Image (cartoon, rainbow, N blue to C red):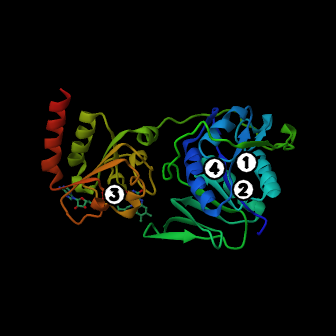
Amino acid sequence: MEENRGIWVFIEVTDGKVEGVSLELLGAGRKLADKLEVPLAGVLLGHDVRKISAKVIEYGADIVYMADHAVLELYRTEAFMKAVVAMAEKYKPEIFLYGATPNGKDLASAVATDLSTGLTADTTMLDVDPEKRLLEASRPAFGGNIMATILCKKHRPQMATVRPKVMKALEPDASRKGEVIEEEIHLEESEMRTKVLQIVKETTKTANLAEAHVIVAGGKGMGDKNGFMLIHELAKTIGATVGGTRDVVEAGWLPHDQQIGQTGETVTPKIYFAIGISGAIQHVVGMKNSELIIAINKDPDAPIFDVATYGLVGDAFEIVPQLIEKFKELIK
Ligand code: FAD
């Protein structure tokens, strides 16, 4: 374990573009690396990915470990795992972070098994104890009632998958300098047990929610499906996307892909309206990083006010129609 040094971030590339979560992890990894006084490295795999290494450095990496190979063109567990494990065994990182995306989760679990180390899944907070050099990976546990901080004391690297949109990417700095180390990985297409025949992309409303600049979210406080129509009306007036709590989804007022929170989407819009939402931790983890949060609730002690930028205490059925009217006037 003494030999393991340095923070690594898996750089996920889709259609030639770095996934946002990888850039966010470079931001989070930078803080950990500075605290431990070690380099931050991005692990970049793919085909024709050389040009991407500059971006990885701009977003905070000191080193890019790169494997450029035709077999790595599209994600496959076996090929990516072999490449990552070979690099990790050679360079021995102490911490290795992955985005909690379908491919990131798949790869991290395969690598953890092969390296016989621990993995914390779906982390929402990261810190490090510089004395003990232990990664403190926190995530909601026991039905979201507590935040558990998970340590990996006896194995290296310490690994975690981290939810997209929870960490903040650094501002890119084109003047940053870094080293690109190209690795020769032995991979043969004929040895691969799986082939990607076709990628079928699903287009759901979830994408809208993740990319939305303004979200109007409603909770059980809207009374019933009819009352929830006010949320739709406000959203339509200001060109926002509608979201809701799990209770609203369970009541059948919204489809599941519009649920925000621990078991739904994580969102970071510029403006988030939380209307008739109590602010349970499982909801808050999915929206607390919104730039501006406007909460409307008739209970002045509702926990949503703890994370709100502006709080309006009152009946949504009185306040929201007035807001709609005012916005309509302004937009006219
Ligand atoms: P309530 O908690 O019932 O809150 C309604 C609020 O509306 C109250 O604060 C009330 O004061 C206010 N109100 C009532 N009438 C009015 C009115 N006329 N005007 C203004 N305000 C009014 N929840 C999620 O949202 N997302 C998740 O992903 C999620 N995952 C979960 C995972 C697990 C494992 C568990 C156990 C729970 C999860 N939950 C999740 C559920 C979560 O714990 C809460 O139950 C849920 O968020 C509460 O939804 P709510 O705020 O709509 O309802």
User: N-terminal of the two: label 1 or label 2?
Assistant: 1
Mark 2 residue element? helix
- Residue at horizontal 63 percent and vertical 32 percent from the top: 15
- Residue under numbered circle 3: 247
Label 1 crowd bin: few (<14), some (14–19), many (20+), radius 10 Å: some
- Residue at horizontal 62 percent and vertical 69 percent from the top: 130
Mark 3 residue element? helix
Res. 104 mark: 4
Left or right relative to 188: residue 56: left
Q: Amino acid at mark 1?
A: Thr
Mark-to-mark CA distance, 3 and 4? 29 Å
Q: Amino acid at mark 3?
A: Asp
User: N-terminal of the two: label 3 or label 4?
Assistant: 4
Q: Is mark 3 within 8 Å of ligand 1?
A: yes
- Residue under numbered circle 2: 110
Rendering quarter of residue 239: top left
Name the mark nearer the viewer: 3 or 1.
Answer: 1
Name the one closer to the observer, 89 or 128.
128
Ligand 1 falls in quadrant = bottom left
Mark-to-mark CA distance, 2 and 3? 35 Å
Label 2 crowd bin: few (<14), some (14–19), many (20+), radius 10 Å: some
Q: Amino acid at mark 4?
A: Gly
Left or right relative to 259: residue 173: right
Taking the image as drawn, is residue 135 in sight? yes
